[in-house]
Image (cartoon, rainbow, N blue to C red):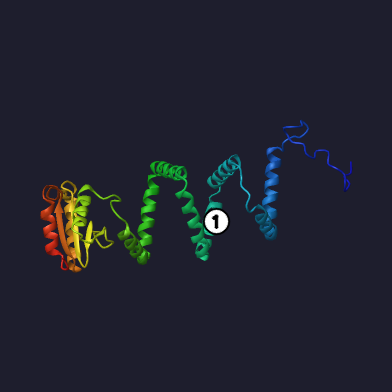
Amino acid sequence: MVFKKGNTPWNKGLTIETDSRINPPSEKARRKMSESHKAYFKNNQEAKRELSEIRKGTHHSEETRRKISESNKKDYKNNSERKIKQVKSLKEWIKNNPKERKKNYEKVKEFYKNNDNARKRISERQKEYFKNNPEAIERMRKRTIEYFKNNPEAVEIIRERRVKQVFPIKDTKIEIRMQNALKERNIIFEKHKPIFGQPDIFIEPNLCIFCDGDYWHNLDKGKKRDKIVNKVLTEKGYILLRFWEHRINDNINDCIKEILLSTPNRN
């Protein structure tokens, strides 16, 4: 039968589920269609762009996303050349599109900020991956060392950001006690000032106060770090006061007297 324009195809609106005459294509036919489809879009960039525009705003179902993911994993596993090509293409795009990269980064950041489950899934996958691939840890370590070796400005940026991070996030009991005692005497101070060593309490112009826990700061690691902090801050012209946990708990007034004596502009 010759199909004429205007005629309605016999199988229009029929699906595999609703009509037994509709047979699914064989594996060979599907593969052939897929190859033909890929070849067409490879040689027709205009058609590729048009299809991309049409698909904008559309969303795949959960089942479709799963199938695409499985297909890509299988393809990458069996086709390392395609994987290398795609990684190179992505790196090139990132290099040439700094504004778009930043925009995408903000989107991803916002997504993971609002999706605890997604963060948890990624964390679990990474743990599982590194657990089963110890050589990957070594590769990452070498890459990181090489990157910072060739990018000293990146090291400086990280140092600056790290100084502004508050460790720990919550104030300890002895820090809170010291803060309350200073507030009662109307002494203005700043918590965790972003300078080297990040003093627990800072009083203008240059007084750094540390409230040291009896356990952690008595360990060799703690003593070593405190010694470095003392040396660096002293060389920069800061005045340092360190108060042990037991002293703060036993005689907070004595600690405050010492602070007042060390504060140049005290009332």
Compare residues 215 and 32 and report the one nearer the observer.
215
Quadrant including the C terminus? bottom left
Compare residues 140 and 98 and report the one nearer the observer.
98
- x%, y% of residue 237? 18, 69
Residue 174 left/right relative to 82 = left
Compare residues 1 and 203 and report the one nearer the observer.
203
Residue 29 left/right relative to 90 = right
Report the residue at 87% width, 44% height from top.
7
In the picture of the structure, the residue carrying the numbered disc 1 is 85
Compare residues 267 and 190 and report the one nearer the observer.
267
Q: Which residue lies furthest to the top in this view?
A: 20
Report the residue at 33% width, 65% height from top.
156
- x%, y% of residue 39? 68, 53
- x%, y% of residue 91? 50, 60
Vertical order, 185 against 133 (above or below) = below
Report the residue at 70% width, 45% height from top.
32
Vertical order, 66 against 262 (above or below) = above
| Mark 1 residue element | helix
Q: Check disc 1 and give the amino acid type.
A: Lys
How many labels were placed on the picture?
1
Residue 113 left/right relative to 237 = right
